[in-house]
Amino acid sequence: MGASLPPKEANLFKLIVKSYEIKQYKKGLKAADAILKKFPDHGETLSMKGLTLNCMDRKQEAYDLVRLGLKNDLKSHVCWHVYGLLYRSDRDYREAIKCYRNALRIDPDNIEILRDLSLLQAQMRDLAGFVETRQRLLTLKPNHRMNWIGFAVSHHLNSNASKAIDILEAYEGTLEDDYPPESERCEHGEMLLYKVSLLEECGFLEKALKELRGKEFKIVDKLSYKEEEASLLIKLNCLEEGEKLYRVLLTMNPDNYRYYEGLQKCVGLHSETSQYSSDEIDKLDALYKSLSEQYTWSSAVKRIPLDFLDGEKFRDAADKYVRPILTKGVPSLFSDLSPLYDHVGKADILEKLVLGLEESLKKTGGYPERSEKEPPSTLLWTLFYLAQHYDRRAQYDMALAKIEEAMQHTPTVIDLYSVKSKILKHAGDFTAAAALADEARCMDLADRYVNSQCVKRMLQADQVPLAEKTAVLFTKDGEQHTNLHDMQCMWYEIASGESYFRQGELGRSLKNFLAVEKHYADITEDQFDFHSYCLRKMTLRSYIEMLRFQDRLHAHAYFRKAAAGAIRCYIQLYDTPPKPSADEDYELAKLPASQKKKMRQKQRKAEARAKKEAEVKSEEANAVGVSKYGKRNVKPVDLDPHGDKLLQIEDPLMEAGKYLKLLQKHSSDYLETHLLSFEVNMRKEKILLALQALKHLVQLDAENPDTHRCLIRFFHKVASRSALTTDAEKLISGVLEAERPTFSRLHDKSLMEANTVFLEQHKDSLMHRAAAAEMIYCLEPNKKAEAIQVIEQTNNNPVSSNGSLGPVKEWKLKDCVAVHKILTSTFDDQDAALRWKKRCAVEFPYSTYFEGSLCSTITANKASKQTHENAKNGAIESIASNGQEKCLQTVASFDRSQRVDNMDRRPGRAGSDRVLIAGLVWVGKLGASVWADRFWSNSNDRIDSRSCDQSSMARDVGFGPGPRRLGPRMAYQIDRFINYRWKYRKSKLDWIVQFVLQSAF
């Protein structure tokens, strides 16, 4: 490097390299400029200056300088290496590999370039090249441990585990007998465990066990050693030794489910299907009873028997398991027992058991057959469990009754509001669910989980702006929405994208879905740093596991949801493209002159506002300082916040195809993947690809309604094609004729006959009948009335859900919504859609979509109408108006120049606390004067307003009969502002008055 320079400049060149390595970019830049003053065409200096500028976010200058340097010195390995580093920083790994290979042609033994090349080959999974490069590194530096390990790992990744074992054994042969030293024992032990895992992978089980036991004294991780030994003993059928070892492991961790599974395998009582004979159940029961006596504190040893026991034994075991958990008040009890609801009969037993506990707690205050009294909270958690139980069984009336009873018992438990919100969501009242989730959030503003649940409910209710404001409460100050993206908050982006899609805002929806895809690209890039780190730290088993996880990364549920959402957006964009500007001008021209003028003014204002916001963001970005390394801390400005540019694409289906390929590669066993493939290829008129998707659908689920739709649509489309003219069309037609008999549903039948058979086979299923009706209309449009009748004649029959104690109907809310959309869009029959809506409103009274009688929107409208009528008749409660009037008078008479530090809590003084409390109390529909006077008379410094029983006051203000507590959300706000009022004592009272006015009025 810098060999063609004089000694002084050569030293400066070394300084450039050193400054780059220690991130002192300004210093390196200064040295480069000093060389270039005397030697302006020195290629290596130009390249290093470009590399330094690249680290200072001056990309274009960097590329120009590096290319100029390479042009001036084409045979310099430094210039090619720097060019590769530049491409690597921009994640263009293929171009970087080309540059590294060119550098190696000039300097084939350069260790740094070979090491960088091997990292890129591992990243790109160029496994053959990775093996070759690691071999060259080992040849050049055989005394370096990392080169031996890297060579072994490369062969393992290249599906040659036996060769990797030989390399590790050769490496061990170079070590001395007393190796490793104390400082390297952990790393060497990890290497030995990795070697044992390779032997196990190759099937050399006896050799693996012998190797493991022979090197026991060199392995530091004793837990991994015992787990690996136990696994090998089971595979070698040494069950007695394995049983002893698993019992040892259970003494170390009696709550590890894998240890119990291993112990069952050793005693011959394990079944992959969880199906056991009565004799096996008795043996398992005896085994776990003995273990429970040994590990009395373990919850796993009590929970596992519930999976295989049944009948009275199950009831007794469940009773013993549930009682202490209800007494302790563990909210996750239902989540723990919910897998049992898939077992026939167990849900009924649990229901009867917990109902019995509830009855006993209400009558005697204790459990059945026990004289000891239980704490009052036990009844609360029993009701809490029952509410979730009935919610699981779709008995929403009973679920809401139980959760309401629990809330009356203890109205300050946050989990009650969260569960009620979930019940209402399942019942279809998304608006009320969001309001309750927000109420739960306000009870503990420091709980991120409750905040996230609230955001989810708001997005499900399509309250996106409010959800965003709530979500950013837990982000850093500044660019709030950008922080959610930086945090890779994928659940938020997916839920937000789905909400925008429901509202028809394709641009914003697409922007959120593509943001998730960007996160997965970032996760893929994040593995790059581990290629060298894991070899250096010898975390080889974790490294291999991480690489395999990365290979199946795009099979993750979040990516699948985001990719499917993006494909749907592109399909809808193809079906209904946005209007071009000429069409918009034509629509504008049809408006009256006055409306036209208003529309143009709004457009100009919107454009001016957007331009101003962009300028402000640009100025803020430019004003950001430079770090000590010379790198600008500039956040990129989002120039397309609403995703409008994403809609301006020429071929939406081509864009959809990019994500479809990833789904087909990584999620081929999901029905949705092939449904989307069918829709895209049918629109592209790629007949054979659509046929391929159809065959996958039939293979996965031939009886699915969507599969039936695709089958009939496909062959109907093929049959209705025009005359075949080209050889390609004739060839495709021949393939279709050969493939049609392979579909058993169409064998010797017309499409209408096949549809009739399908309808007869699934006459009791709503979605199957809807699919058959849709196909009747597709095949013969003149039979529209008959097709609609097929849907309307469907009965919502009760179904037995493991012998449920209450009535459970067959219809699901989401299915009924889908049928309503079919009637509206496919059939375009508003009368039929209205009839269906009225029918479903009876079946789902809490549904806001169908406007059921018990949904929040209907009840709110009824309450508003009743209040309006009462006001007309003069029958409105006087105390409410008096409270409002008094609060307004208090606020109006307030001296705005007064400071908070002049406030007084005595009844005769108009302090800021009194103004605030009056407003908040009136918001809660309580009498301001009555409650405020009681509040001021309290002399304690800290007041817990949530504990105030308002029984007498409730009767005073007309909210009776019976005791009433303050609403938890209002009580929390009161308590928070009163107890922390001194925090704001230096601020003016304007802020408090403004808060009251905005909150209350």
Image (cartoon, rainbow, N blue to C red):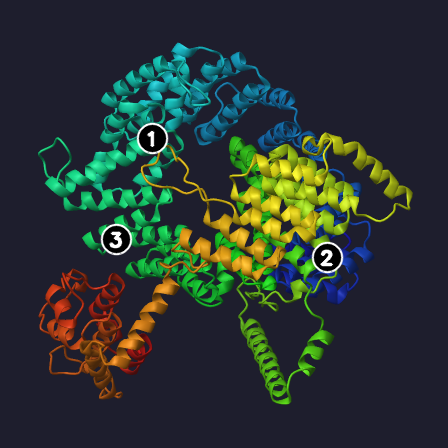
> Which percent across, then down, holds residue 165?
60, 21
Which residue matches tag 3? 404
Callout 1 amino acid: Lys
- Can residue 421 be seen in the rendering of this structure? yes
Callout 3 amino acid: Glu
Callout 2 amino acid: Ser
Q: Which numbered mark, 2 or 1, is in the foreground of this view?
A: 1
Q: Residues within 10 Å of mark 3 (few under 14, many from 20)?
A: some
Mark 2 element type: helix
Q: Residues within 10 Å of mark 2 (few under 14, many from 20)?
A: many
- How far, Cα to Cα, is label 2 from label 3? 72 Å
The numbered mark, 2 or 3, whose residue comes first in the sequence reads 2
Picture residue at 79% right of the left edge, 55% below the top:
70
Picture residue at 50% right of the left edge, 27% below the top:
188
The numbered mark, 2 or 1, whose residue comes first in the sequence reads 2
Above or below for 400 versus 470: above
Which residue matches tag 2? 47
Mark 1 element type: helix
Relative horizontal placement of residue 695, taking residue 945 as reference (left or right): right
> Which percent across, then down, holds residue 770?
57, 46
Which residue matches tag 1? 346
Q: Residues within 10 Å of mark 1 (few under 14, many from 20)?
A: many
> Which percent across, then down, holds residue 525?
60, 47
Look at the image and tell me in which quarter the C terminus lies.
Answer: bottom left
Relative horizontal placement of residue 722, taking residue 11 as reference (left or right): right
